[in-house]
Amino acid sequence: MMQANERIQSENGGKRGRLFVVSAPSGTGKTTLCTALRERFPDLSYSISYTTRSPRKGEKDGRDYFFISLEEFRAGIDQGRWVEWAEVHGNYYGTSAFALEKTLSSGGDLLLEIDVQGMRQILERFPEAVTIFILPPSVASLRERLFKRGTDASEVIERRIADAILEIARKDAYRYRIVNDDFERARDALLFLIDACRKYEDPDTTDFL
């Protein structure tokens, strides 16, 4: 296991930051868990993704996402602006390569919320990233959560469920897995994992709940 004091040297000679990648099917509670994580570790930087989709109720530009036009996003692809990007449910999402590398090179730890496709792209460039997958208790419970959320039409929800089944099938590509069947237990497991990875060494356990 890689000890905390054995991190890759950054460009300025200091310790390079750690990159934490969290993924989950839509409706699994990833955003709420990551919010709790950021509250517990305020020094943990957070990568805000860029997207072409419209803001949902309560979302703010620059806080939840950077909302940009399709034309600007496609220009970013041509310019190599994104370290990872994907089209999800008809919308584009991407992560700034410059912002990511700047934080890690300066020694800061960083949290990134992306989908399975994006995680694979990230590992190609940052193989040392700590990857975590959040699982729903079951597909049935996930469908119930999505309907209760009330933000999507039934046909959109069924498409999200189909995508979730494919994403769950790839859970073994992640180093760690947490089942969110109880928020407080899942939150505590995530906090323990991040704290252990930042302070000491990568825990051997892959399934926390």
Image (cartoon, rainbow, N blue to C red):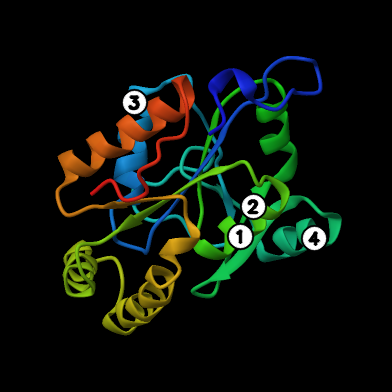
Disc ID at residue 39: 3
Please name the residue shown 34% across and 26% down the image.
39
Please name the residue shown 57% across and 48% down the image.
49
Mark 2 or mark 4: whose residue is earlier in sequence? 4
Please, what is the three-letter code of the amino acid marked with disc 2? Leu
Disc nearest the viewer among 1 and 4: 1
Q: Quadrant of residue 26?
A: bottom left
In this rendering, is residue 37 above or below 43? below
Q: Are marks 2 and 1 in contact (CB under 8 Å)?
A: yes
Disc 2 packing (10 Å; few <14; some 14–19; many ≥20): some
Disc ID at residue 123: 2
Mark 3 or mark 2: whose residue is earlier in sequence? 3
Mark 1 or mark 4: whose residue is earlier in sequence? 4
Disc ID at residue 75: 4
In this rendering, is residue 148 above or below 99? below
Please, what is the three-letter code of the amino acid marked with disc 3? Glu
Image coordinates for residue 3, horizontal then vertical, percent: 55, 24
Judged from the image, the secondary structure of the residue bearing numbered disc 3 is helix
Judged from the image, the secondary structure of the residue bearing numbered disc 1 is helix
In this rendering, is residue 118 above or below 112? below
Judged from the image, the secondary structure of the residue bearing numbered disc 4 is helix
Please, what is the three-letter code of the amino acid marked with disc 4? Ala
Disc nearest the viewer among 4 and 3: 3
Q: In terms of depth relative to the viewer, which is nearer, 105 or 173?
A: 173
Q: Which residue is mark 1?
A: 120
CA–CA distance in space, label 2 to label 1: 5 Å
CA–CA distance in space, label 2 to label 4: 23 Å
Image coordinates for residue 98, horizontal then vertical, percent: 75, 38
Q: In terms of depth relative to the viewer, which is nearer, 104 or 5?
A: 5
